[in-house]
Image (cartoon, coloured by chain):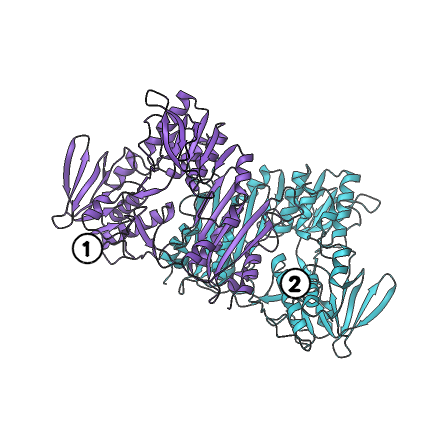
Chain colours: A cyan, B purple
């Protein structure tokens, strides 16, 4: 019997395991998961904190029964520490001590961990929220300790989501950002209104403020945030959202090719440089369709998709299973989140990112009502499109708007993905109804404006 | 001085007039509008009835000042009755009697009128709602006469919008449909739940029920609806939404080429068979991108766009103005409306429409949650995709969902417009966030399913 060992039982790992088992039912599939949970939605964590969801268990996507039905064996609390691509063995640690398992096919889908950019924090009151058990612990902490002041370290997407959730839970929130502004993946002109808006929502934003340490108030419990400049501010609760690092040290040591960040390099079937080793998910650098570069994209859909494609390819590497039907066409990094009632969306590159890639990028920024302007409370949509001046090809889009208006990003994502020009997008026959938007959709308006600045 | 006469001062006419004047500032632009209003949003009418908008005047998109600033002369209440493409004169009727005006360039943008498929209705209490003045009269009628029972004739999009608006206004609504089901532009499997849903919303739907006449209750006032089967039902108020006919008789008489329905045929610069006569908007049959046929598309965005392109082409036909920069690439008929809290959207052809075109159409119908399934009240999205079996090319999409989830139609519209295959759409990197939808967007799920049924 051929054995597939999957390291990591989340989006990519479980997608791969399920797909491989479906296409190759004779395959023995063993998943080693470092935490106690497989297949949970880390994206759902803020909704638990802001009490839209009552029970952390709701974030589990697969139960024991589902796993058994799939014929997949899961070993929880088993953390891979090394593997040998020649003897084809994985070493791992678990409660029972060190152990090892032989594989015929191996998938590395170990995801990423939170970067903690300061000395080891005190144990109680500090959370990183990558694992479901951390979310459960956070929830218990809030209920038992009734914290009043929350500190969030890092004002990227996750930091802002947590700040928004804590504020909606009634906490006094301080958000610390090392860099000059929040949401740095967006262009500066898109987010310049954010500090005032956050203030209004009850979140105090400290930009250009590096956190040096988290102070204890005794019994190993968090008491304060100390900045590099030496300021100390009270905090009963802290979330560290200062970036992610891939859990790939063991794989890199084994000789798997990776970026210097540790993100594993793969082909378009998610195969690494070792013939029987695949990688998928957050721990991978996938080809970015716009920049052409291998790029880490810690997002749910690409992770799931990479997992499926890896599973497909693994099954196809077995005897008597026909060749893989899917290849991974790369990523554009389509991102979406909601902070309070505002949606924030992005696809492709920002203008700043495109310029950093030395592209001759042109951009337009349009503001529009989110409904026909005669409707009550029409709201505002804020949209930026970026294109390559010479070819006219779209490089990216950024969008903010109330309700679900940010779903407009999907049409832009498709346009960026297929290399459409701004001119072509300006001809899009978008939908119109007064309560959904203006006759001329902001996407079409921006594309028409942008086309004028392009040579084609 | 060269004179452009524009017949019809709404979406297409005013877009053309503005565009032509901007590109050719020396042009004299005269608009003859049959009603008392130019540039108003007929799509906004239901929102007035359901009291989201307070004043019909809010639906006016252009005021006198705006017109003057644009340098456009408007004659209200002036209805074109004939024109001579050789002597280049338009005859029209107005309060002052019959008159005529000479033109150098002519645009026919006279829109469409409601079909009234029964003997002339009594004057009071019956409305067709094509002109803003009719909406004003309806609003006055509701306020003065306090009707309790509303009849809507025709369960297409407009009929359903009015039924929804009347029900939200607290009226007892009866909706009469000659055909076997509501919203016939959608496939039967998409709308089979509608009768029960309408009932729950307080609208009684009578399918297979042709209205023979509207009965009077004295003093020229509506009293009842009489069906062809002889049933009589009380009605204090009726809206006729049984279809539209183009206001083009005078143009057809002058020799303009048109479909037998009266819809004018144009080239991709909106020019008719007469060199100095253009047509745009509801009164035109534009090339449908999927079927290839000239097709009437009485929708706001295509009307506005046709108007602009006509204006562009008209200006470019003048001396010393460079050639037109835009061509009209055809329509896919992207449609969107909201009934209560549900969005209904469509683009391209339905399965039934594709089969009527003798295409080898395959279709999939998926249901999905409108948010991640662990979110509270996740709602349901109902999506159908249609493709050509041989080429795999997408032919159309239909979508229903709560809130603004139906904005997903824009990505499908773009895909249909550029002739994308289902397989390519299945690779779309759509946006994910738990409160906006599931990880695998229904569009991607349906496209993947559909791709399996296609040969490419």
Residue A81 rendering spot, x and y as whole percentages: 78, 67
Q: CA distance from mark 2 to mark 1?
A: 60 Å
Residue B15 sits above or below residue A10 on the image: above
Q: Nearer the viewer, residue B135 or B438?
A: B135
- Farthest right residue? A96
User: Contact, CB < 8 Å: mark 2 with mark 1?
Assistant: no
Mark closer to the observer (2, 1):
1
Residue B4 rendering spot, x and y as whole percentages: 20, 46
In-image side of A121 versus A280 (left or right): right
In-image side of B385 versus A244 (left or right): left
Q: Residue at x 76, y 51 (%)?
A: A134
Q: Nearer the viewer, residue B406 or A199?
A: B406
- Farthest front residue? B229
Mark yes or no: residue A263 visible: yes
Mark yes or no: residue A192 visible: no
Report in which chain the residue with disc 2 lies: A
Residue A411 rendering spot, x and y as whole percentages: 48, 55
In-image side of B67 versus A259 (left or right): left
Q: Nearer the viewer, residue A149 or B290?
A: B290
In-image side of B254 versus A393 (left or right): left
Marker disc for residue A203: none
SS class, disc 2: loop
Snapshot quadrant of residue B29: top left
Judging by the rendered image, the residue that carries numbered circle 2 is A281
SS class, disc 1: loop
- Other-residue count near label 2 (Cα within 10 Å), few / some / many at <14 / 14–19 / ≥20: many
* Same chain shared by disc 2 and disc 1: no
Report in which chain the residue with disc 1 lies: B
- Other-residue count near label 1 (Cα within 10 Å), few / some / many at <14 / 14–19 / ≥20: few
Marker disc for residue B275: 1
Residue A28 rendering spot, x and y as whole percentages: 76, 69
- Farthest bottom residue? A86
């Amino acid at each position: 019997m051929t054995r597939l060992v999957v390291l990591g039982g989340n989006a990519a790992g479980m997608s791969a395991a399920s797909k491989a088992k479906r296409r190759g039912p004779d395959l023995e599939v063993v998943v080693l998961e470092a935490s106690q949970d497989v297949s949970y939605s880390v994206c759902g964590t803020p909704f638990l904190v802001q009490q839209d969801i009552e029970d952390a268990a709701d974030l589990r996507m697969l139960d024991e029964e589902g796993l058994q039905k799939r014929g997949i064996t899961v070993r929880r609390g088993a953390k891979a520490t090394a593997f040998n691509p020649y003897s084809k063995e994985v070493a791992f640690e678990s409660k029972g001590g060190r152990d090892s398992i032989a594989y015929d096919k191996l998938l590395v889908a170990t995801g990423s961990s939170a970067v903690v950019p300061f000395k080891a924090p005190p144990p109680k009151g500090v959370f990183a929220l990558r694992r479901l058990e951390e979310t459960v612990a956070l929830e218990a902490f809030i209920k038992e300790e009734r914290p009043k002041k929350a500190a969030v370290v890092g004002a990227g997407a996750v930091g802002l989501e947590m700040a928004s959730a804590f504020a909606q839970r009634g906490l006094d929130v301080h958000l610390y950002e090392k860099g000059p502004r929040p949401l740095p993946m967006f262009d500066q002109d898109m987010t310049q209104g954010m500090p005032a808006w956050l203030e209004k929502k009850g979140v105090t934003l400290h930009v250009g403020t590096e956190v040096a340490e988290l102070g204890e108030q005794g019994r190993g419990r968090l008491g304060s945030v100390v900045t590099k400049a030496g300021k100390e501010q009270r905090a009963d609760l802290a979330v560290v959202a200062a970036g992610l690092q891939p859990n790939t040290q063991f794989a890199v040591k084994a000789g798997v090719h990776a970026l210097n960040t540790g993100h594993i390099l793969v082909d378009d079937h998610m195969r690494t440089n070792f013939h029987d080793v695949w990688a998928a998910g957050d721990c991978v650098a996938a080809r970015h369709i716009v920049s052409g570069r291998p790029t880490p994209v810690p997002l749910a859909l690409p992770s799931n998709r990479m997992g499926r494609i890896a599973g497909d390819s693994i099954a196809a590497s077995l005897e008597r299973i026909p060749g893989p039907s899917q290849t991974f066409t790369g990523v554009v990094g389509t991102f979406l989140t909601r902070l309070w009632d505002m949606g924030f969306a992005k696809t492709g590159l920002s203008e700043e990112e495109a310029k950093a890639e030395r592209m001759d990028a042109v951009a337009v920024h349009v503001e529009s009502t989110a409904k026909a302007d005669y409707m009550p409370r029409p709201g505002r949509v804020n949209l930026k499109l970026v294109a390559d001046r010479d070819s006219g090809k779209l490089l990216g889009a950024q969008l903010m708007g109330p309700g679900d208006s940010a779903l407009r990003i999907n049409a832009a994502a498709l346009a960026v993905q297929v290399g459409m020009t701004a001119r072509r997008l300006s001809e899009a026959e978008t939908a119109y109804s007064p309560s959904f938007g203006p006759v001329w959709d902001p996407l079409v308006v921006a594309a028409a404006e942008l086309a004028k600045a392009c040579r084609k």
